[in-house]
Image (cartoon, helix red, strand yellow):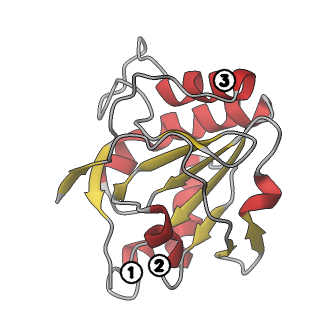
Amino acid sequence: MLLDTPLCDFGWKAPNFTLKNANGDGFTMSDYLGDKGLVIMFICNHCPYVKAIAARLAEDTKQLMAEGINVLAVMSNDYQSLDADSPANMQHFAKQYGFTFPYLVDEDQQVGQQYGAVCTPDFFGLNHLGELQYRARLDDARLQDDPNRVPELVNAMRLIAKTGKGPEQQHASMGCSIKWR
């Protein structure tokens, strides 16, 4: 089912969490909340929307991380019912697209629920205080590869890193619904 993300609730305080990657290594959100902010994104392996942006996502997040903006990805889908999103397949997907950010399993779906994640991809751009400043799409290219695309997430996170505030105008991300138990 195609869904759009809700509008950004500016200033919403993101809850802390600790999740593991497919290898069992733990990652705590507050450890990644650097002085330039943090992107938390809800993605999965099987969604055609995530697949369509995966290469651009890898490129944009590498750029952000090189600029000191941290990135975490969370997979909240019920992979017991959808093997394509299993931890083993998460490792394969991350390698296939060259993801350099931690890709974490939300085993009990609690983090996805706390954040109000609705679809994959769903992007949360936080300032250094952990306040939501961006809840929108990756770019304006949608499902296309467009060399003239506007990298909206990158631009927003640069603004957040500089000012602590996100852009007033944001465009909802769209994607597949999260597969809840």
Question: Could you tell me residue 172's position as x and y percent?
Answer: 32, 37
Label 3, secondary structure: give it.
helix
Front position in the image: 31 or 43: 31
Q: Which residue is mark 3?
A: 158
Identify which residue is drawn at 76% across, 67% down: 28
Where is mark 1, residue-wise? 78
In the visual, does 104 lie left or right of 75? right
Residue highlighted by disc 2: 109
N-terminal label among 2 and 1 = 1
As measured in the structure, the alpha-carbon distance from the residue carrying label 3 to the one carrying label 1 is: 33 Å
- For marks 2 and 3 on the same chain, the one whose residue lies earlier in the sequence: 2
Label 2, label 1: how far apart the Cα atoms are: 8 Å
Q: Residue at x 50, y 85 (%)?
A: 108
Amino acid found under the numbered disc labelled 2: Gln
Q: Nearer the viewer, residue 177 or 132?
A: 132
Q: Residue furthest front?
A: 11
Q: Based on the displayed image, in which of its 4 quarters is residue 37 positioned? A: top right
